[in-house]
Image (cartoon, rainbow, N blue to C red):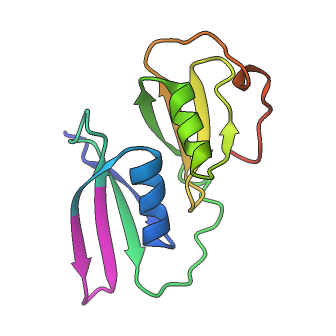
């Protein structure tokens, strides 16, 4: 058995691509527009392991509410510097729901409320302002 990808439905493809590409640094690996089904599939992967993809499914013209997305769980990405990634996401306007107080783990939510877990490769010592920052919202 070989792991292929995880799929998440998105409400606004451009907004979601900004989060995954600009925010998390994932690269688009392929895209499929399916006019007969009225949907677009966009596959993204981290440059370090392009074989493990996230599939964004966008249903054209859908106003469907996918709920709070907590039934999905989360996507997890290992990062080289969790503080730098969190600072970058904040600079793009995203809220760090669970700050990296311990220098190891943080959570942020995508525009479609998908929880994204960021895990530090190795361990960094606790650092302010993260060490005393409270959780914000759900994660």
- Residue lying furthest front: 91
Residue 100 pos. (x, y %): 64, 26
Residue 35 pos. (x, y %): 25, 88
Magenta part of the chain: 31-43
The image quadrant of residue 24 is: top left
2 magenta-colored: no
The majority secondary structure of the magenta stretch comes to strand
For the point 76% across and 47% down, the residue is: 137
Depth check: 79 or 138 in front?
A: 79
Q: Where 49 falls versus 129 (above or below)?
A: below
Residue 18 pos. (x, y %): 45, 59
Q: Could you tell me which quadrant the N terminus lies in?
A: top left
Q: Where 111 falls versus 24 (above or below)?
A: below
Q: Could you tell me which quadrant the C terminus lies in?
A: top right
Residue 107 pos. (x, y %): 61, 38
For the point 25% across and 90% down, the residue is: 36
Q: Where 86 falls versus 67 (above or below)?
A: above
The image quadrant of residue 129 is: top right
Please give the count of numbered marks on the rendered protein: 0
For the point 65% across and 61% down, the residue is: 68
- Does 12 sit left or right of 94 as displayed? left
Q: Where 54 falls versus 8 (above or below)?
A: above
- Does 35 sit left or right of 130 as displayed? left
For the point 26% across and 32% down, the residue is: 48
């Amino acid at each position: 058995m070989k792991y292929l990808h995880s799929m998440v439905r998105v409400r606004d493809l451009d907004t979601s691509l900004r989060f995954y590409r600009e925010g998390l640094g994932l690269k688009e690996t392929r895209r499929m527009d399916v006019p007969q089904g009225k949907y677009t599939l966009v596959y993204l992967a981290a440059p370090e392991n392009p074989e493990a993809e996230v599939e964004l499914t966008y249903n054209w013209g859908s106003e469907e509410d996918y709920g709070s997305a907590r039934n999905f769980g989360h996507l997890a990405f290992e990062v080289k510097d969790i503080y730098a990634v969190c600072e970058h996401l904040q600079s793009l306007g995203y809220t760090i729901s669970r700050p990296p107080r311990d220098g190891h783990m943080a959570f942020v939510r995508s525009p479609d409320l998908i929880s994204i877990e960021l895990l530090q490769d190795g361990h960094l010592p606790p650092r302010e302002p993260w060490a005393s920052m409270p959780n914000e919202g759900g994660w």
